[in-house]
Amino acid sequence: MTPTETPTIDQVLTLARRLSPRDQAHVVAALASQVAQALPAALPALARRALTPDEARALWVELRESMRVLPGPRRTLGEQLDADRRDRDRALTGRYEENSDVDA
Amino acid sequence: MWTLDASIYVRAAEPDDPSGATCQELIDRLSQTGALIVVPRLLLAELAGVVRRLTRDPIRARLAIDSLSFMPHVQLVTLDDALIDEAAEIAADRALKGADAVYVAVARRHRATLVTLDREQRERAAALVAVMTPTEALSALAQPGE
């Protein structure tokens, strides 16, 4: 494979498997974001598929693992929820402050 | 029957959060015992929004939605007119934030114990429903007959 050729999925997977688990997670996160932007119309259909209980539990484990390897320092999800709830409360009570910590 | 506030799920999703292990242990324990968890469908939006805003990753946020939507023993309660009216009255009477009042309304309708890490929500809902921290809930589940 030369740098100008389009690699096959097998070639990409072979390369990716040489990475550390942390770097593999980074690759997944980077690709997931790109796919989400490229195929927004396909996502609702994916989300509607019914999952078995085991699949639902596996997804939760996957989510937790992906959060664990997220680069830091950063807010936790709990801190983000608290901040979002505080911001909304401030907005509704006329004490609004722009939240610049989050990109759209 | 139990109602878990969003504060429980978002911390359970973070293994490194100081309360993460306790919150996940509570979810696991409830699942093992087959106890029914009733939560407002609003939880999906809260969890997805927080995951998306923190990670900037829409797919990860959708994973969170899918996981909770199909989790066994979790009943997502649709917010009908009566429940919204009840939440509004609770918010008015108890000075609770709107989303907090929704969880209290769901717990009250289903006679469920509300578990939350939000101290204000616990204190202001205590006159209406049974409320616990995750640690208190785990202790209660460890008692014979629970």
Image (spheres, coloured by chain):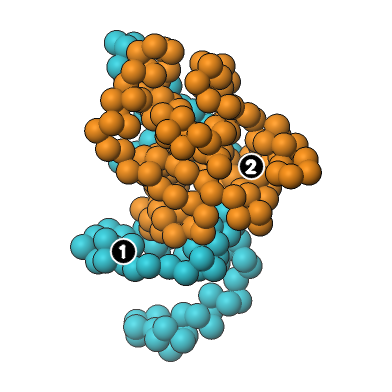
Instruction: Check the image and report above or below for A14 versus A104.
Output: below
Q: Which residue is mark 1?
A: A48
Chain A, colour shown: cyan
Which numbered circle lies on residue B23?
Answer: 2
Three-letter code for the amino acid on which mark 2 is drawn? Cys
Q: Residue at x 40, y 40 (%)?
A: B40
**Residue most extreme to the front:** B145
Image quadrant where residue B131 sits: top right
Instruction: Check the image and report above or below for B82 versus B124.
Output: below
**Image-based side of B87 in relation to B146, left or right:** left
Q: Secondary structure at mark 2?
A: helix
Q: Residue at x 44, y 60 (%)?
A: B70
Image quadrant where residue B144 sits: top right
> Would you say residue A97 is visible in this rendering?
no
Q: Please, which chain is the residue tagged with disc 2 on?
A: B
Q: Residue at x 53, y 36 (%)?
A: B112
Is the N terminus of chain A in the top left, top right, bottom left or bottom right quadrant? bottom left
Chain B, colour shown: orange
